Image (cartoon, rainbow, N blue to C red):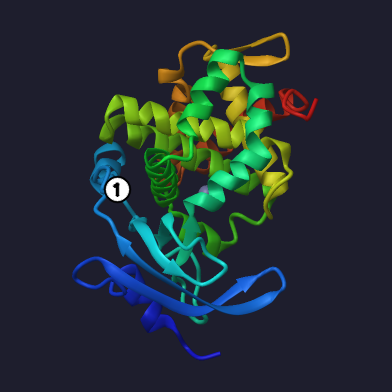
């Protein structure tokens, strides 16, 4: 394998996009059964929800890892692995090229919606009260606006990862070796992402993004039935659930979760994530351990509540 670091760097800068927004990606794509040559021809659309980096600096006074923009793209033509049309998003730094820390990852919104339909919708109806599940499913609808919500939520979560010490530094130092530490980091990224949304997005959009987070975390990840990070996904979902219950943002009614006010859901998680991030920035090891202990004890106390019925 050669050294692709120059290309990786150019990708993050958006050098793969022509002046009119069009781009062509052609290269080997790893799939379960091996690698195949795939191509996507698409167009980047203007969709900048808010200035995430400035908001992070306003909140924490420090930003140690650049926030990679997520490119909202329309797929115009593609080889068989990808949907020939539809909305997708490219994360220029989402995947490492050989000898490079960064490279592109492409996620098709249609794949995501398909996965949610198969894995999540029934489960969301089981976990949440009738009103809440309707509201969450509406946020996950497979429309163009639904796709933009997915992209917003993905970008917010990624921005959350960049805060504090920064995900890259944590990966490099081996801090995320255990499923528990990865779950805390996922949970923290959601919480900080929620804070950023509250500051930078219209309240309606921010609330829709939290519905997407709730649906994905508690309706899909909680089952541990999907993805490579099953153990940490389940742990992270329990942390999310515990924050909702401990703060009174939600109660259990019958066997379902009833959320008091969806427009302020995830507030407590955001507060704790803020504390944890401040401790990271202040290199306050004791503070970090204290917050992590509280969250992990909380997650353990709700274990079983989200297990499949
Ligand atoms: Zn993450």
Q: Position of residue 188 (x, y in %)?
A: 50, 39
- Residue at 26% over, 48% down: 48
Rendered location of residue 166, percent (x, y): 43, 54
The residue positioned 44% from the left and 43% from the top of the image is 150
Q: Quadrant of residue 175?
A: bottom right
Res 236 → quadrant: top right
Is 53 displayed left or right of 125 in the figure?
Answer: left
Q: Which residue is mark 1?
A: 62
* Quarter containing the C terminus: top right
Vertical position of residue 112 compared to residue 124: above or below: below
- Res. 14 visible in picture: no
Q: Tell me the quadrant of the picture where the N terminus can be found.
A: bottom right
Residue 48 appears left or right of 77: left
Which residue is located at x 49 percent, y 57 percent? 107
Outermost residue, bottom direction? 2
Q: Nearer the viewer, residue 14 or 100?
A: 14
Residue 156, image x and y in percent? 39, 43
Residue at the outermost right position: 309
Of 56 and 111, nearer the camera is 111
- Residue 127 is left or right of residue 281, and the answer is right
**162 relative position to 309: left or right:** left
Badge 1 element: loop
């Amino acid at each position: 394998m050669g050294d692709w670091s120059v290309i990786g760097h150019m990708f993050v800068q958006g050098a793969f996009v022509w002046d009119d927004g069009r781009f062509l990606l052609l290269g080997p794509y790893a799939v379960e059964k091996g690698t195949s040559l795939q191509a996507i021809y698409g167009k980047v659309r203007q969709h900048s929800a808010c200035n995430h980096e400035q908001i992070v600096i306003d909140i924490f006074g420090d930003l140690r890892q650049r926030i990679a923009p997520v490119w909202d793209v329309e797929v115009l033509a593609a080889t068989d692995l990808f949907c020939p049309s539809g909305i997708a998003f490219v994360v220029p730094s989402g995947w490492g090229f050989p000898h490079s820390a960064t490279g592109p990852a492409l996620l098709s919104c249609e794949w995501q919606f398909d996965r949610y339909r198969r894995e999540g919708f029934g489960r969301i109806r089981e976990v949440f009260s009738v009103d809440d599940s309707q509201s969450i499913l509406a946020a996950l609808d497979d429309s163009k606006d639904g796709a933009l919500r997915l992209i917003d939520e993905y970008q917010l979560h990624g921005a959350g990862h960049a805060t504090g010490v920064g995900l890259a530094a944590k990966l490099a130092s081996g801090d995320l070796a255990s499923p528990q530490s990865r779950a805390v980091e996922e949970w923290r990224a959601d919480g900080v992402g929620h804070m950023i949304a509250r500051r930078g997005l219209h309240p309606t959009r921010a609330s829709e993004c939290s519905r997407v987070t709730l649906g994905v975390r508690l309706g899909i990840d909680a089952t541990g039935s999907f993805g490579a990070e099953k153990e940490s996904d389940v742990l992270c979902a329990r942390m999310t659930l515990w924050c909702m219950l401990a703060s009174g943002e939600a109660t259990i009614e019958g066997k379902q979760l009833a959320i008091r006010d969806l427009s302020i859901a995830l507030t407590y998680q955001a507060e704790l994530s803020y504390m944890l991030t401040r401790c990271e920035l202040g290199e306050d090891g004791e503070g970090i351990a204290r917050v992590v202990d509280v969250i992990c004890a909380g997650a353990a106390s709700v274990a079983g509540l989200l297990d499949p019925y």
